[in-house]
Amino acid sequence: MALSRRGFSLLALAVTANPAMAAHVDYPRVRPGAQLRFPADHGAHPEHRTEWWYLTGWLRTAGGEPNGFQVTFFRTRPDVDPANPSAFAPRQVLFAHAALSDPKVGRLAHAQRVARAGFGLAEARVGDADIRIDDWRFWRMADGRFRTRVGGTEFQMDLTVAPTQPPVLQGEHGFSRKGPALEQASYYYSLPHMQVSGMLRRGGRLESVTGEAWMDREWSSSILGADAVGWDWTGLNLEGGGALTAFQVRDASGQSLWAGGSLREAGNMMAFAPADVWFEPIQRWRSPRTGATYPVEQRLSVKTPGGVRIWRIRPLFNDQELDSRAGGGPVYWEGAATVEGGRGYLELTGYAAPLRM
């Protein structure tokens, strides 16, 4: 879900707050009953307020060391007057995060980019996935595989990611509720069990890597209600080809305002209602940098027709906090995690400060 998915860039916020440039934009609403279409919905939806391409996974080097990775590209449409004739008006803003979780380092290595669309600096293609910010890129190739090239001072990644399963259409055939109001929703699909291969450079050393990944795609114009401060989300590749998605949207007291997700196993697909999902903190970790406290180990329970099933989510290591404030984003926890019989990622937002979407 990522919405960490999910904050505006400083540029977008500055423009929105500038009365000389801001205007009321009539963003389209997300509505039930829409049919997602591929490959078109891999591409951008520039009329909506925000969207993201969210890739997380596990890499393994030739020496066998496990590493988590995250690559997320965001697009946002600021509240800028569409009639503004200036070529410099930021009608679309793109930003991206990339992170590497190496247990030997014990903290995230992180890099980010932000740019206004246009001028050859940044673009998000309509009709198929191809998002560029300077020298960073995420795109779908002619053979159906995805590729990304990102990096910063501590690492560079060049990864090819191949789907092995059809998309999981989250919620009601891709219409995913995030609150009691109908407009608090997104179009949302996932691609689990993607096979990864490529190159990782760090510390001056270039290594070949393989692994498995998960991709989330969401776009919307209104997601969180006024009482919501953040969410807990997990996407888990289960042994045997199963895929588990679960999330809860929380209020300021930590109580669940809404929950959902899905489980696809052995060809069967089940979408969870809000009462079907429980997150229970087991272990908390306090960031020495921001002071935020995150429930990095949790017990996840989901109600299924066969009874309640429980997974214990454990982080690869505790310090996987991502601070994107330098690019206008939030502080949140985004980490590689395991469960018995699977592994994936856990995302925890709104613990450092309320997240506004």
Image (cartoon, rainbow, N blue to C red):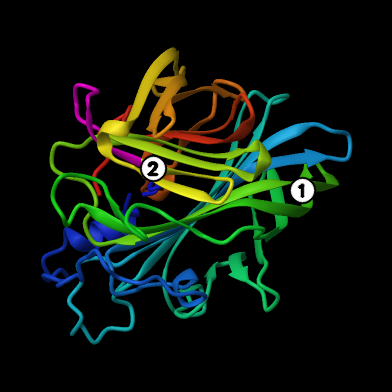
Question: On residue 261, which mark appears?
Answer: 2
- At x 18% / y 85%, what residue is drawn? 83
- What residue is disc 1 on? 200
User: Image height check: is 44 above or below 333?
Assistant: below
User: Image height check: is 44 above or below 84?
Assistant: above
Q: Nearer the viewer, residue 265 or 198?
A: 265
Q: Is residue 81 magenta?
A: no
| Span colored in magenta | 250-260
Crowding at dot 2, Cα within 10 Å, few <14 / some 14-19 / many 20+, comes out as many
Q: Position of residue 340 (x, y in %)?
A: 62, 24
Looking at the image, can residue 12 be seen? yes
- At x 45% / y 20%, what residue is drawn? 298
Q: Element type at marker 2?
A: strand
Query: Disc 2 marks which amino acid?
Result: Gly
> Which mark sits nearer the N-terminus, 1 or 2?
1
- Left or right, 74 with respect to 345, comes to left
Q: Quadrant of residue 163?
A: bottom right
Q: Element type at marker 1?
A: strand
Q: Position of residue 61 (x, y in %)?
A: 82, 40
Per the model, the C-alpha gap separating discs 1 and 2 is 32 Å
